[in-house]
Image (cartoon, helix red, strand yellow):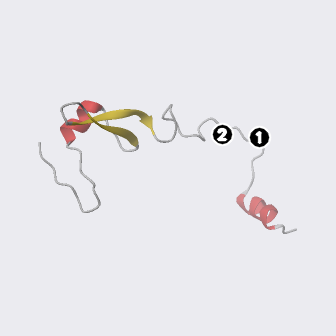
Amino acid sequence: MTTNITSKGQVTVPKPIRTALGLEPGVGVDFSVNDAGQVVLSKHGGKQNNASGRDRFDSARGKAEIHWRTKDLMALLRGED
């Protein structure tokens, strides 16, 4: 498979390669050069959000005990009485 490099140094990883490595948007990749001078592309290990691949706010979602109305919260933040 051949692909072209852009003026910014970017390449598109062909779909069969992305599928074989399990590469999805947001997943990091590592590049290395082996002893034969070949470039090796490998999956880094997870989404860039964090090592678990979960959004960092997932654990906090839905935990608030106070249910604010938007207008009341905005008034508080703006210092309005």
Q: Residue at x 84, y 69 (%)?
A: 80
Q: Residue 44: horizontal and vertical position, in percent?
A: 39, 34
Q: Amino acid at mark 2?
A: Gly
The one of 23 and 69 positioned closer to us in this rendering: 23
With 61 as the anchor, is 6 left or right in this view?
left
Tell me the element at label 2.
loop
Query: Residue placed farthest to the front in the image?
Result: 35
Q: Residue at x 54, y 40 (%)?
A: 55
The residue where tag 2 is placed is 62
Q: Which mark is residue 65?
A: 1
Q: Quadrant of the C terminus?
A: bottom right
Q: Quadrant of the N terminus?
A: top left
Tell me the element at label 1.
loop
Distance in Å between CA atoms under marks 2 and 1 = 8 Å
Q: Residue at x 16, y 54 (%)?
A: 4
**Label 1 CA crowd tier, 10 Å (few <14, some 14–19, many 20+):** few
Q: Residue 67: horizontal and vertical position, in percent?
A: 75, 47
Q: Amino acid at mark 1?
A: Glu
Q: How many marks?
A: 2
Q: Residue 3: horizontal and vertical position, in percent?
A: 15, 50
Disc 2 to disc 1: CB gap under 8 Å: no
With 23 as the anchor, is 2 left or right in this view?
left
With 5 as the anchor, is 46 left or right in this view?
right
Query: Residue placed farthest to the left in the image?
Result: 1
Against 5, residue 41 (above or below) is: above
Quarter location, residue 19: top left
Q: Which mark is residue 29?
A: none
**Label 2 CA crowd tier, 10 Å (few <14, some 14–19, many 20+):** few
Query: Residue placed farthest to the right in the image?
Result: 81
Quarter location, residue 26: top left
Quarter location, residue 40: top left
The one of 54 and 34 positioned closer to us in this rendering: 34
